[in-house]
Amino acid sequence: MDSLTIKDFHRHPCFNPEAKGKFGRVHLPVAPRCNIKCNFCDRRYDCVNESRPGVTSSLLSPQQAGIYMDRVMEKEPRITVAGIAGPGDPFANPVETMATLRLIRRRHPDTLLCVSSNGMGIGPHIDALAEIGVSHVTITVCAVDPAIGEKIYAWVSDGNIVYRGRQGATLLLERQLAAIRRLKEAGIIIKVNCIVIPGVNDHHVEAVASRMRELGVDLLNCMAMFPNVNTPFGRLAQPDQDTMRAIRDMAETYLPQMRHCTRCRADAVGLLDDDRTEEFRSCLSSCAAAVIPEGVKRPYVAVASREGILVNQHLGEARSFQIWERLDGRFRQVEERQAPPSGGGITRWHKLARVLGDCRAVLVSGIGATPAEILSKSGIEPVEAAGFVEEALTLIYSGGRTGMLRGKRRKSCAAGGCSGGGEGCG
């Protein structure tokens, strides 16, 4: 975010009503899965006829999103914001989301980056979001009381565990509040969306607004619920304009209000005052059908190195990984990514596979059998190497036999009978 200034933030049309007629946004639909089930949400997102959040006409991979972004910028230079708003939740799809954000930042460094989330899974990614330069985040908070939240959410998923009722609503609220605190500590501008549901939380919006002010939220968007007929709340009436005006007037005593929301689709593109989603639909469809070569899908190589010159760290020792790419025949370090913290056993390696999801290989001085198997199954080739980083990168990117890189393998805990799955084994 070094190339951006504070006044650049005013180029975001959702956060600044004065920008909505001058600057535009593009939503990149790379996140189909969701980790909560709202009673007002219809998850059938493949739609061209509805204009509401959670729908898109096509889905993109991160690489396809990069192609689409290039074409959009050629045709609509007023776009200043690239956002990910579904059609599910960005952090139920963290590999795709983070890969897309990194790709857009690299190829369009002056573009503002934005994500919209329910807050359930964003926590572990906040440091990386700040590092990439994501400047704006929207969190949807419909209740700050689990007794009300349990009426809104059918279930909440945390990994492979599904929580329902009061337990699910409590967990979601805890994650949302913790995420907002950490996002503010990271200097990220936050908008909170609150869906107003008649008879469910319309009397509770003031409590939401008050709590969000305490947390330092920058903007509140009270949105009228859109009644989807195939949902539990499908028969509820949509709040009328007078009702919403009164609610926003009340909430404005706590926080600035977004009064110009157009309830954008997950594939929206253009200015808020001049939406071009329909016009770009064929372009989106064409990009969604683009065949991406395998090498382009995973453009990076991760390296475990103490000083960035030699491959000299065992996987289990590495607290971070340097991420390298080949560009115009030369190698350059793109960034440094933190490894999952120690603890958790085998879960740590599954998390690492997600962190390195856009890497074709990881260069280490040694690795245990279990993490090697997990990374391999995730499409990341574990390569034991000794010597200079750039020599190893040359062989990997040229398609050479990686066995040639293996030096004298360090004795690891495998010699003591460990299978390579425990902490410190790597």
Image: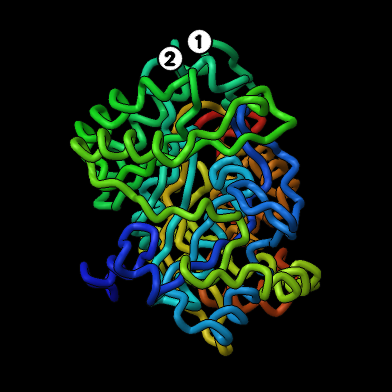
In depth, the one of 102 and 227 nearer the eye is 227
User: Within the image, what quadrant is residue 75 found in?
Assistant: bottom right
Along the line of sight, which residue is nearer the eye, 255 or 99? 255
Q: Quadrant of residue 151?
A: top right
416 versus 129 height, above or below: above
Q: Nearer the viewer, residue 92 or 43?
A: 43
Q: Secondary structure at mark 1?
A: helix
Q: Which mark is residue 146?
A: 2
Q: Residue drawn at (67%, 74%), measured in percent from left and top?
A: 280
Q: Residue at x 64, y 40 (%)?
A: 371
Colour pattern of the rendering = rainbow
How crowded pointer 2 is (Cα within 10 Å; few <14, some 14-19, many 20+) is rated as many
Q: Are marks 1 and 2 in contact (CB under 8 Å)?
A: yes
For badge 1, the amino acid type reads: Arg
Report x, y in % for residue 189: 29, 52
Name the residue carrying label 1: 166
Q: Could you say where residue 48 lies in the image, as x and y percent from the top left?
A: 74, 58
Q: Position of residue 226 (x, y in %)?
A: 58, 38
Residue 58 image-quadrant placement: bottom right
Nearest to N terminus: mark 1 or mark 2: 2
**Apparent side of residue 188 relative to residue 326 in the rendered image (left or right):** left
Residue located 31% across and 67% down the image: 1
Q: Residue at x 29, y 23 (%)?
A: 207
Q: Quadrant of the C terminus?
A: top right
Does residue 346 appear in the picture of this structure? no
Horizontal and vertical percent for residue 193?
Answer: 41, 41
In the image, taking residue 392 as reference, residue 257 lies left or right, namely: left
